[in-house]
Amino acid sequence: MQGLDFYLGYNFSYNKNVFKRTTLRDDGNNGSIDARGENETTTKFTNHRFLLGAGFQIFLRGKK
């Protein structure tokens, strides 16, 4: 006995990352904060993928 299989699929993924960074700077080395910097970086990506495949199967008979 044999079989032939086909499959079709779709895959979607979405990702978003946010990175926040704060930098404090003391210019006079006196313990007070003289400068403050903030940075926020955002990265986004999406992925779309179609899948198509085929499979072949062979079923073996067991011993009687």
Image (cartoon, rainbow, N blue to C red):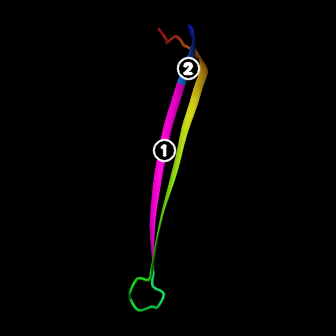
Which kind of residue does numbered mark 1 sit on? Answer: Asn
Asked where in the image residue 8 lies, by quadrant, the reply is: top right
- Which residue is at 46% across, 54% downward? 18
Can residue 19 be found in the magenta stretch? yes
Quadrant into which the N terminus falls: top right
Determine the secondary structure under disc 2: strand
Report the magenta stretch's main SS: strand
Q: Nearer the viewer, residue 12 or 55?
A: 12
Q: Nearer the viewer, residue 46 or 51?
A: 46
Name the residue tied to disc 1.
15
Judge the density around disc 1: few (<14), some (14-19), many (≥20) Cα neighbours within 10 Å.
few
In the picture, residue 36 is in which quadrant?
Answer: bottom left
Which residue is painted at 48% across and 44% down in the image? Answer: 15
Residue 8 disc label: 2
Q: Which residues are magenta?
A: 10-24
Kind of residue at disc 2: Leu
Q: Height in image: 3 above or below 28?
A: above
Question: Does 15 lie within the magenta span?
Answer: yes
In the image, residue 2 lies at what x, y percent?
A: 58, 9
User: Residue 20: x percent and y percent?
Assistant: 44, 62
| Residue 63, percent from left and from top | 49, 11
How far apart are labels 1 and 2 at the CA level? 24 Å
